[in-house]
């Protein structure tokens, strides 16, 4: 049984392509000299692969599955992006997520382009053997699409280190005689994975939040000590972030998963929640906690709200009720453009996905570099590199934002600044401005071929 997620009101356009275009258009209002031809090029994915393949299930029956792999842009390097297994995933959602990866890699200065993949399936109802067959068959369908220098998958919703190990193994069997380790990141450490990769996204979100608070935009909360934190989604990203917030002295008052949420005002110990979830399959029912819905969780009074599950969780129907002071996007696309405008009016800051959750792709890049040389870097080196990347990215976005605040920069002539106030774009828009400018500059430097 799944818990009630917040229902978006009728009338808000939640089409993922429309949302990504709206965000792009909002950023382009601040970018001077953006050529019309480039806008068309950057809005479209470079390549879309759709495959259908049969799998024999454990009961002997045969079921057909659909899988997608989209590369949005490869101006900076090979396509890079996770693969998710989910019953509701659509090709349009995968396209919009591939675009996000392009902007994310550009923002944190990593030489990858943007890609994303998915298989439409119900991972919770499939056995491990069935998931392995799906993964192997999907990888074999993509044998000439994936590649260490063309398109590199990673984990995402309901895929794991194990899934990545199967992808590597299948690809390696189909391409004998090469060092194929860099074809996929997020592998188990014993198989060429990197120290710190599993933790990187959640840890990176916490580093981003920490650096952001140090800028004193919330004068009474300039570090994480004592911050009251709410996390939606207690998976790879959410559970690691909970532990990192906890280590920094924050109080985790509520967390959730697909079954619902739990609340304890005097704080949860994330390690205890982890143990309970491992034993019972959900966080719900943990002793000495109050059960709440995911919809209620998003509206709790707190300092930091971290959506770390699905997209479109904060929308025009509930944004007015959000009481957090800072939203840190662990998930991709958890906040709709309409909600962004409402949160901005309420003075709630949002650290956007392409900034907050960029830690995952950062350490994926370190894994890829290690794999090329068959090296294993020690955990301190990874942790130091991740911290530097996240701090630099926050600093870059913050100082560019300030240039709008003090009026050094303004919207392009003839444009309005949008909903969020006279002349000042929100952090998502600023992060996108930086990323789009970098990709545009590199595209023009390379020159349009032929
Ligand atoms: P995961 O599968 O490990 O965890 C997902 C969590 O979300 C689980 O706790 C699940 O129960 C919960 N969930 C599922 N449906 C839900 C619902 N309807 N309501 C509330 N909770 C629900 O996935 P993950 O790797 O932690 O990814 C979470 C998000 O972070 C995704 O949006 C993903 O794109 C994004 N992300 C992940 C990475 C990464 O490195 N794993 C990197 C960047 C962004």
Image (cartoon, rainbow, N blue to C red):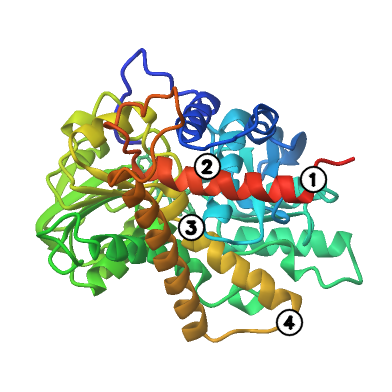
- Please, is residue 376 above or below residue 350 in the view? below
Which secondary structure lies at badge 2? helix
The alpha-carbon separation of the residues under discs 3 and 2 comes to 30 Å
- Which of 20 and 296 lies nearest the eye of the viewer? 20
Instruction: Report the residue at 60% width, 72% height from top.
Output: 366
**Residue 125: mark:** 2
| Percent of width and height locating residue 54 | 76, 36
Separation of residues labelled 4 and 3 (CA atoms): 24 Å
Tell me which corner region of the image, top left, top right, bottom left or bottom right, holds residue 97. top right
CA separation in Å, label 4 and label 1: 34 Å
Q: Are marks 1 and 3 in contact (CB under 8 Å)?
A: no
SS state under label 1: loop
Q: Ligand 1 within 8 A of label 3's CB?
A: yes
Task: Note whether residue 176 is visible.
Answer: yes
Ligand 1 closer than 8 Å to label 2 CB: no
In the picture of the structure, the residue carrying the numbered disc 4 is: 374
Q: Earlier in the sequence, mark 4 or mark 1?
A: 4
Q: Give the mark toward the camera: 3 or 2.
A: 3
Residue identifier under label 1 = 447
Which of the 4 image quarters holds residue 295? top left
Q: Which residue is mark 3?
A: 358
Q: Residues within 10 Å of mark 2 (few under 14, many from 20)?
A: few
Is 128 positioned to the left or the right of 386 in the image?
A: right
Residue 5: tell me if it is visible.
no
| Near-viewer residue (450 or 139) | 450
Residue 239 vs residue 311, the one in the foreground: 311
Left or right: 22 as drawn, with respect to 340: right
Image quadrant occupied by the C terminus: top right
Give percent across and percent down for residue 411. Answer: 41, 33
In the image, residue 351 sits, relative to residue 322, either above or below, namely below
Q: Residues within 10 Å of mark 1 (few under 14, many from 20)?
A: few
């Amino acid at each position: 049984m799944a818990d009630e997620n917040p229902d978006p009101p009728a009338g808000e356009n939640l089409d993922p392509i429309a949302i990504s275009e709206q965000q792009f258009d909002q950023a382009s209002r601040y970018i001077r000299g953006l050529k019309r031809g480039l806008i068309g090029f950057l809005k479209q994915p470079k390549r879309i692969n759709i495959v259908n393949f049969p799998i024999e299930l454990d009961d002997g029956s045969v079921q057909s599955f659909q899988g997608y792999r989209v590369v949005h842009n490869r101006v900076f390097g090979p396509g890079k992006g996770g693969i998710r297994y989910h019953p509701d995933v659509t090709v349009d959602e995968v396209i919009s997520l591939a675009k996000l990866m392009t902007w994310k890699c550009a923002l944190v200065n990593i030489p990858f382009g943007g890609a994303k993949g998915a298989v439409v399936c119900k991972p919770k109802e499939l056995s491990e053997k069935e998931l392995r067959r799906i993964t192997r068959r999907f990888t074999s369908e993509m044998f000439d699409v994936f590649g260490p220098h063309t398109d590199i998958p990673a984990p995402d919703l309901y895929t794991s280190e194990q899934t990545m190990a199967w992808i590597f193994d299948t690809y390696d069997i189909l391409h004998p005689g090469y060092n194929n380790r860099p074809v996929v990141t997020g592998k188990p450490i014993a198989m060429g994975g990197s120290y710190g990769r599993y933790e990187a996204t959640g840890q990176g979100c916490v580093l981003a939040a920490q650096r952001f608070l140090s800028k004193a935009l919330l004068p009474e909360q300039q570090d994480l000590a004592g911050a009251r934190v709410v996390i939606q989604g207690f998976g790879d990203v959410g559970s690691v972030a909970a532990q990192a917030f906890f280590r920094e002295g924050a109080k985790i008052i509520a967390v959730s998963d697909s079954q619902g949420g739990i609340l304890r005002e005097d704080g949860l110990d994330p390690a205890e929640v982890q143990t309970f979830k491992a034993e019972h399959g959900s966080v719900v029912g943990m002793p000495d906690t109050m059960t709440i819905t995911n919809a209620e969780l998003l509206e709790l009074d707190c300092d930091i709200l971290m959506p770390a599950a699905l997209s479109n969780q904060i929308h025009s129907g509930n944004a007015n009720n959000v009481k957090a002071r800072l939203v840190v996007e662990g998930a991709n696309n958890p906040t709709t453009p309409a909600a962004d405008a409402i949160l901005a009016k309420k003075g709630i800051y949002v650290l956007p996905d392409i900034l907050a959750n960029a830690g995952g792709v950062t350490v994926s890049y370190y894994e890829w570099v290690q794999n090329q040389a068959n090296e294993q870097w020690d955990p301190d080196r990874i942790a130091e590199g991740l911290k530097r990347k996240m701090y630099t990215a926050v600093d870059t976005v913050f100082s560019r934002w300030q240039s709008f605040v003090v009026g050094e920069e303004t919207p392009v002539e003839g444009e309005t600044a949008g909903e969020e106030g006279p002349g000042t774009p929100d952090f998502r828009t600023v992060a996108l401005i930086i990323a789009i400018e970098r990709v545009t500059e590199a595209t023009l430097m390379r020159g349009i071929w032929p």
